[in-house]
Amino acid sequence: MTRDRPDGRLIFRPLWLAVCALVSLCPPASLAASRGEQVIVVNGNTIIIGSKQVYLRGVDAPETDQYCLVGQVQWACGKQAARELANKIGGKPVKCKARDGDNVDCFGGGVNLGSWMVSNGWAVASGNVSIYAGEERQAKRGKRGMWRSEFVRPWSWRRGLRSSTSATNSEARVCPIKGEITASGEKIYYQPRHRHYDRVQIDTGNHERWFCSVQQARRAGWEAPRK
């Protein structure tokens, strides 16, 4: 059962909860599920278990006040990401394994919640080593969740960036060739006349880029599409 708090966070109570720690989330004797604990979803990558706030490892989700754009229409993708995580948890037991401080791997019904959020387009891969980079590429390719719209990366939003449209349009006018990285890791470039050109979205945060010429794209390791 869930309910909203005045601050917009989502609460699960009562919920069978098992918090399994490799480091210090709980003592070894507490590995069995306990009844009556609260699970609060703060946003798409942050939850509070009892009195402990933890973060899904390798994942960054939009802030709750963050919006995405479809054309010129804004939609509350940050709030939706939190709802998706809350709905995925539902009434299932939650198990978390501490990995790096407050960064944890959490599982609901046997599903890795961080991986699920990235795979379904409600969060992006983060960290020096992007453990969910493959899941992100597949979500982007399938236009799942936020990937059906324009959005800035959560860390850029926190720095104050609200839209990359102006910068993207400026770069596209000068260097119009799109250098995409596919879900399988292939580097493919698309010229404006290609039939798939308009559907390809360039994400510079994922090492994709614009090119000014075919020669430049080829020198950088990108190849022409097969079709």
Image: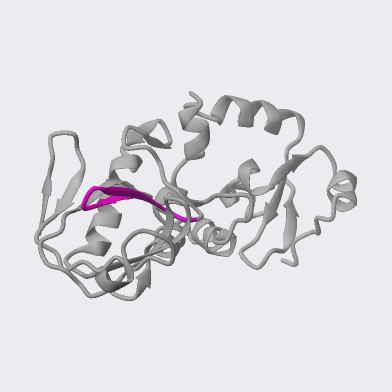
Q: Is residue 217 left or right of residue 90?
A: right
Q: Indicate whether residue 53 is drawn in magenta.
A: yes
Residue at point 62%, 26% (across, down): 167
Residue 45 percent location from the top left of the image? 38, 50
Residue at point 16%, 50% (across, down): 11
Residue 21 percent location from the top left of the image? 38, 65
Up/down of 225 relative to 79, above or below: below
What secondary structure is the magenta-colored segment mainly?
strand
Quarter of image, res 223:
bottom right
Q: Nearer the viewer, residue 58 or 96?
A: 96
Count numbered badges in the picture. Answer: 0
Which segment is the magenta one? 47-57
Q: Indicate whether residue 7 is drawn in magenta.
A: no
Q: Is residue 72 left or right of residue 2?
A: right
Q: Nearer the viewer, residue 76 or 200?
A: 76
Residue at point 35%, 59% (across, down): 25
Q: Is residue 122 left or right of residue 207?
A: left
Residue at point 49%, 61% (across, down): 142
Q: Quadrant of the N terminus?
A: bottom left
Q: How is the image coloured?
A: one colour
Q: Is residue 141 left or right of residue 81?
A: right
Residue 112 percent location from the top left of the image? 40, 68
Residue 144 percent location from the top left of the image? 43, 57
Q: Quadrant of the C terminus?
A: bottom right
Q: Nearer the viewer, residue 171 or 25?
A: 25
Q: Is residue 192 visible?
A: no
Quarter of image, res 108:
bottom left
Up/down of 43 relative to 111, above or below: above
